[in-house]
Amino acid sequence: MTTSVAFSHRLLRAVALAAALLNVAAGARAQSEVEPARSVVAIARAESIMSTDAPLTPAWLYPEGRIDYNVIAWLLSRAVAGSMRAETHADVWDELLSPSDRVGIQVDVEGIQPHDPLLEALVRQIMDRGVPMRNIIIYAGEESELFRAGYDISGRAPGVRVMASDDQGYRHGLTRIVLDYCTKIINVSRLRVDPQIGMHGALANCLAAVPYVSRKRLRQNPEQLPEAAAIATMRRATVMHIVHALQPGYSARDGGGRFETWSYNAVLASIDPVAVDVIGRQILLEKLAEEAEGTESPRLEVRYLVPAAETYRLGVCDPESIDVVEIGP
C-alpha cells in the first residue's frame, strides 16, 4: 500500500513537472512570436532649398541663390507629420502640445543660429497650435555659446525667451529650465560627425540639459552618454526629436570647430531618439563611402547607440525594426 501511494505521488509530481515545462515552452514560443517593437523615422528631403534667379532673388543680386523659407517650412511640416504617420503636422502638434504648455526648444547652438529658417518655422508651428510666444523657450547648455551664436540672452527682448542651462542652475543633475520652466521639450539637433563620440545627433544634444561636469564625463564615456536623455523628467517631457540635416557635417576640421558639409537638404523627425540617430548615422556613412570612392570601407563608430536601446531603453537600435518614411526625392 505504501509503495503504491509513493508511486502515485511520484507520478503526480512527474505529470506536474511535464505540464510546467510545456507551459514554459509555450510561453517562450509565444514570446518569440510577438512582433518586436518598431519605431518610425521620417525624412523629408528637397532637391534644393535655394531659390535662384526668381523675381525676388535676381541672379545679379543673389548669384548663389537665397534660402527658400517656404521649402524649409514644408520639409519640417512633412517630417513632423511623417514621424507619427499623420495627415498634417498640425495633427501631430495637437496631439503632443496644448495651448497651456510651456514649450522648450533644446537647440544645438553650433548648428542652428537665431536666423535659422528651420527654427523660425518650428516656432511658428508651435504658436499656430495656440502656445503664446512668451511660453516658448529656446535653450542650450552654456550661456557663452548662446552669446557667441548671436542670441539675445538678456531676457528683456520681446518674443521667444532664450535661456542657458548653466545660467539657470541645476537640481538633482538636471537643468532648472526643464524642471521649473517647461512642460514639453522639442529636441532640435544638427547632424554631424564628432571626433570624440563619433556622431552628434538627438541623443548627444540632450547633454545640454545636464551640468558641464556631467557633459564632460558622458562625452568621455560614450556608452553612458544616453544617461542625460534617460533622466525621468527629461524622458517624460521630450515629445519630439528633430534633426537638422540640411547641410550635415561629415568631416571635422580644427578639432571639431568646423566641418566639411554637403547639401543633403533634409529634415529628420521621430519620437524615438535612438532610431533617428541610427538613420542619421546611415546617412553620414553613405556620404563617407562616397567620399572614399571605394578605396576603403568607411567607419563611424557610435558606441552609445546600443546602450541607449538595451541599457537605457530609450528606443530602437535595430535598423530592421525602424520604418523609414521618405518624403521627396
Image (spheres, rainbow, N blue to C red):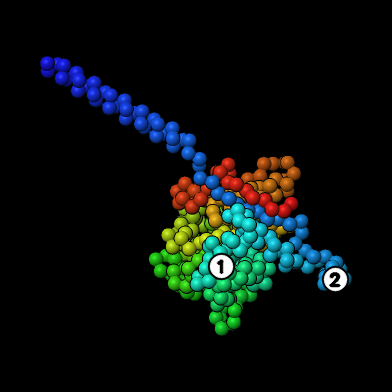
Q: Is residue 320 above or below residue 239?
A: above
Q: Nearer the viewer, residue 206 or 12?
A: 12
Find numbered disc 1 in the image and state the secondary structure of the residue it sits on: strand
What is the x, y in percent for residue 148? 62, 73
Q: Which residue is mark 2?
A: 55
Q: Report x, y in % for residue 283.
A: 66, 50
Horizontal and vertical percent position of residue 139: 55, 70
| Amino acid type, label 1 | Ile
Horizontal side, residue 248 vs residue 215: left or right? right
Query: Which residue is depicted at the point 51% across and 53% down?
Result: 222
Q: Compared to 122, does 154 lie above or below?
A: below
Q: Is residue 33 visible?
A: yes
Q: Residue at x 34, y 28 (%)?
A: 21
The single residue placed furthest to the bottom in the displayed view is: 156
Seen from the viewer's position, the closer of residues 16 and 121 is 16
Instruction: Tell me the amino acid under the disc marked 2.
Output: Pro
Q: CA distance from mark 2 to mark 1?
A: 34 Å
Residue positioned most to the left? 1
Residue 57 as seen in the image, left or right of residue 78: right
Residue most toward the right?
Answer: 60
* Residue 270 in the image, given as x and y percentages of width and height: 58, 55
> Local crowd at mark 2 within 10 Å, few (<14), some, or many (≥20)?
few
Say the numbered circle drawn on residue 246: none
Q: Is residue 299 left or right of residue 52?
A: left
Give the residue drawn at x 49%, y 52%. Answer: 314
Q: Residue at x 60, y 47 (%)?
A: 323
Whether pointer 2 and pointer 1 mark residues with C-beta atoms closer than 8 Å, the reply is no
**Residue on which the image places disc 1:** 105
Q: Kindly indicate the quadrant of the structure image that contains residue 114.
A: bottom right
Going from the N terminus, do you reach mark 2 or mark 1 first?
Answer: 2
